[in-house]
């Protein structure tokens, strides 16, 4: 139904009635379609859904009640308002008419003003119902977003209160020790022992906070989806990773990548994190090989980033996407455990999916999808 519903289907087996009503309504600017019996009416409705139906009750073969029942039994046509038409000398079963879903009735011969008034009434009700329905959908969507951001806030609070405590405890512990032992220690000789952990943990905390803020920003920034050439984005990401690629002698190959509707900065971040990890989590003495591939599906693009690194065990497939969840110490492989959480958030914002397939000791493939949102279908709000 359009915003200004004007399309009316008249169903009547008397050609004179059809002609008269059709002419009068057309003159008033309605778009009118006629059907001479119930069967043709149902076919017409299936072809193009009218905004309202004027339905004669007394018709041979299939009467108006039956046509109405058939319309109401199918979800696609159940919502079309039906006004019954009945001749003055017909026995109109009003109760039945309303019971099977009719919303009003008009008795012939018509009084033109009355017909207009009844039609307009019903079309206005329909429009308001539709508006209400759309507003409800919007509210539901907002509510879902609110729940999600609440959950994120809880997660964020948990992470801040737990994971940032640890370096802070080291810092305060050593500082207290330093104070307590100040008269006994020779700072010139023992500074390293007491001050280095304070400095190290302070730097670690700075890194954690920086990445945590980046994670938090990844979800709150204003949506800015535009045609994004992934080939170009990949090229830039590889340029950013140039140092790591050279040091590790990584070999990176890619299929030609498509242009997708996306936030280009975030897609760059995504490639950089996944390829960066593929290089970082390499097996010792095995040069990293990373293959980027893409597959076109009817509704989405399916991307793959495959490496030949240390692999991830299946029990950790979900865990690694959570903030600060790492499978290694900072000494084994440096990092904060935020990269994949950011990737997950970016993909969530693009309404795609991200997942892992991996063989321990052989390599890992990250899969992610980007829906093919067409221009009219996405909302930058
Ligand atoms: P970080 O690399 O800073 O630890 P990530 O969120 O990027 O943070 O990754 C989380 C964990 O997932 C890593 O600590 C690592 O254990 C594991 N991981 C991520 N990518 C790979 C990969 N390509 N191969 C093996 N393990 C990986």
Image (cartoon, grey):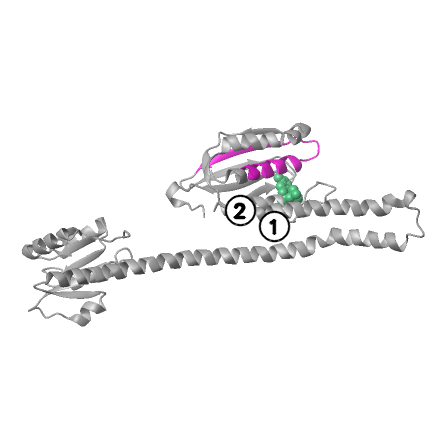
- Name the residue rendered at 22%, 69% in the picture: 99
Q: Range of the magenta residues? A: 268-296
Q: Which residue is mark 1?
A: 322
Q: Say what secondary structure mark 1 lies in.
A: loop
**Residue 44 horizontal side relative to residue 189, left or right:** left
- Note whether ligand 1 is within 8 Å of mark 2: no
Say if 155 sits above or below 248 in the image.
below
Total numbered labels placed on residues in the image: 2
Please tell me how crowded label 1 is: few (under 14), some (14-19), or many (20+) other residues with Cα within 10 Å.
some
**Residue 96 horizontal side relative to residue 197, left or right:** left
Ligand 1's quadrant is: top right
Q: Nearer the viewer, residue 333 or 118?
A: 118
Query: To which quarter of the image does residue 20 belong?
Result: bottom left
Q: Say what secondary structure mark 2 lies in.
A: loop
Q: Is residue 269 magenta?
A: yes
Say if 236 sits above or below 263 in the image.
above
Q: Is residue 281 magenta?
A: yes
Residue 45 coordinates in the image, percent (x, y):
21, 52
- Name the residue rendered at 70%, 31% in the picture: 285
Residue 209 coordinates in the image, percent (x, y):
67, 48
Q: Nearer the viewer, residue 337 or 211?
A: 211
Q: Nearer the viewer, residue 252 or 226?
A: 226
Query: To which quarter of the image does residue 128 belong?
Result: bottom left
Residue 106 coordinates in the image, percent (x, y):
14, 65
Residue 64 coordinates in the image, percent (x, y):
15, 62
Q: Which residue is mark 2?
A: 221
């Amino acid at each position: 139904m359009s915003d200004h519903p004007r399309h009316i289907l008249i169903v009547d087996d008397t050609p004179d009635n059809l002609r008269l009503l059709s002419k009068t309504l057309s003159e008033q600017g309605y778009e009118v379609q006629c059907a001479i019996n119930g069967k043709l009416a149902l076919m017409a409705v299936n072809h193009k859904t009218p905004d309202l139906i004027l339905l004669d009750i007394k018709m041979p073969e299939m009467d108006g009640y039956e046509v109405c029942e058939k319309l109401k039994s199918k979800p696609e046509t159940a919502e079309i308002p039906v006004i019954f038409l009945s001749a003055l000398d017909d026995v109109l079963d009003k109760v039945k008419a309303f019971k099977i879903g009719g919303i009003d009735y008009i008795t012939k011969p018509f009084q033109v003003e009355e017909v207009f008034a009844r039609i307009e009434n019903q079309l206005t009700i329909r429009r308001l119902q539709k508006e209400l329905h759309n507003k409800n959908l919007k509210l539901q969507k907002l509510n879902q977003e609110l729940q999600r951001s609440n959950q994120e806030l809880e997660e964020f609070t948990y992470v801040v209160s737990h994971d940032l405590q640890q370096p802070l405890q080291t810092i305060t512990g050593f500082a207290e020790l330093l104070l307590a032992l100040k008269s006994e220690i020779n700072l010139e000789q023992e500074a390293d022992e007491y001050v280095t952990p304070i400095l190290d943990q302070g730097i670690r905390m700075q890194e954690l906070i920086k990445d945590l803020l980046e994670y938090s920003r990844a979800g709150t920034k204003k949506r800015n989806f535009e045609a994004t050439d992934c080939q170009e984005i990949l090229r830039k990401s590889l340029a950013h990773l140039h140092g790591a690629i050279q040091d590790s002698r990584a070999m990176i190959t890619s299929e030609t990548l498509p242009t997708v509707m996306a936030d280009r900065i975030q897609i760059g971040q995504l490639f950089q994190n996944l390829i960066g990890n593929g290089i970082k989590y390499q097996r010792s003495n095995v040069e990293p090989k990373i293959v980027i591939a893409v597959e076109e599906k009817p509704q989405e693009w399916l991307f793959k980033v495959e490496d030949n690194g240390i692999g991830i065990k299946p029990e950790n497939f979900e865990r690694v996407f959570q903030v600060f969840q790492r499978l290694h110490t900072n000494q084994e492989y440096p990092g904060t455990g935020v990269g994949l959480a950011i990737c997950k958030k970016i993909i969530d914002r693009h309404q795609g999916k991200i997942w892992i397939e991996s063989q321990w000791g052989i390599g890992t493939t990250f899969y992610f999808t980007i829906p093919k949102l067409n221009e009219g279908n996405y909302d930058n709000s």
